[in-house]
Image (cartoon, rainbow, N blue to C red):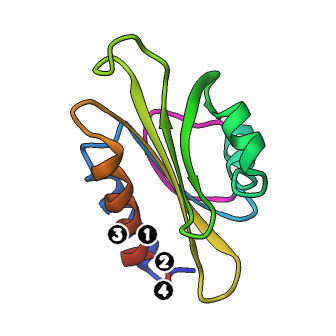
């Protein structure tokens, strides 16, 4: 889903995103194409590929990375967006999460997931991730 030779450029662009604590780009099979920041286990990535399949389950279970549960606040299946954050009494202490999917020209979807901390909010992180995927996914 990338033009030949663009993988390294996309990896560098992902690493340059300093507002994200972690970033990961992966395909529908869970194969990671690029990643940066804090780790994400393969079993977590596999679960993200099905997050859009059952809205109620995604709201109920949240999204889990490295054993940390992120409560899901919004699921937009048609737009390909899910976002939420860790539970915290002080919103400045929590960590946000955004999962975005976009169709690939070859078929299927490509996914991007980022986590971020205050002062970054979903109102910035989600559109930034959408723009990133639009730039790199063909």
Residue 14 image position (x, y, % from top left): 36, 56
Image depth: mark 3 or mark 4 in front: 3
Query: Mark 1 packing: few (<14 Cα in 10 Å), some, or many (20+)?
Result: many
Residue in the image at 60% along x and 70% along y: 78
- Residue indicated by mark 2: 137
Q: CA distance from mark 3 to mark 4?
A: 17 Å
Mark pair 1, 3: CA separation: 5 Å
Query: Are the residues tagged 1 and 3 within 8 Å (C-beta)?
Result: yes
Q: Residue at x 52, y 34 (%)?
A: 39
Cβ–Cβ below 8 Å for labels 3 and 4? no
Picture quarter containing residue 13? Answer: bottom left
Mark 2–mark 3 distance (CA, rounded to whole Å): 10 Å
Q: Which mark is residue 131?
A: 3
Give the image location of residue 88, x and y in percent: 43, 15
> How far apart, in angstroms, are the residues tagged by discs 4 and 1?
13 Å
Q: Are marks 1 and 2 in contact (CB under 8 Å)?
A: yes
Instruction: Please state the extent of the stretch shown in magenta in the rendering.
Output: 31-42
First of labels 4, 2 by sequence position: 4
Packing grade of label 4 (10 A; few <14, some 14-19, many >=20) is: few
Tell me the element at label 4: loop
Q: In the rendered image, which residue does mark 1 sit on?
A: 133
Q: What number is the disc on residue 3? A: 4
Q: Would you place residue 65 above or below residue 56 in this image?
A: above
């Amino acid at each position: 889903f990338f033009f030949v030779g663009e993988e390294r450029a996309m990896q560098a662009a992902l690493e340059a995103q300093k507002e994200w604590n972690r970033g990961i780009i992966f395909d529908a099979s869970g194969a990671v194409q690029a990643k940066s920041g804090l780790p994400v286990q393969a079993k977590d990535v596999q679960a993200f590929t099905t997050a859009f399949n059952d809205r109620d389950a995604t709201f109920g279970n949240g999204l889990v990375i490295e054993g940390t549960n992120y409560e899901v606040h919004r699921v937009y299946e048609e737009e390909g967006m899910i976002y939420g954050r860790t539970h915290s009494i002080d919103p400045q202490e929590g960590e946000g999460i955004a999962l975005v999917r976009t169709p690939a020209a070859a078929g299927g979807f490509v996914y991007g997931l980022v986590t971020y901390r205050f002062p970054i909010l979903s109102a910035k992180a989600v559109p930034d991730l959408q723009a990133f995927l639009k730039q790199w996914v063909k």
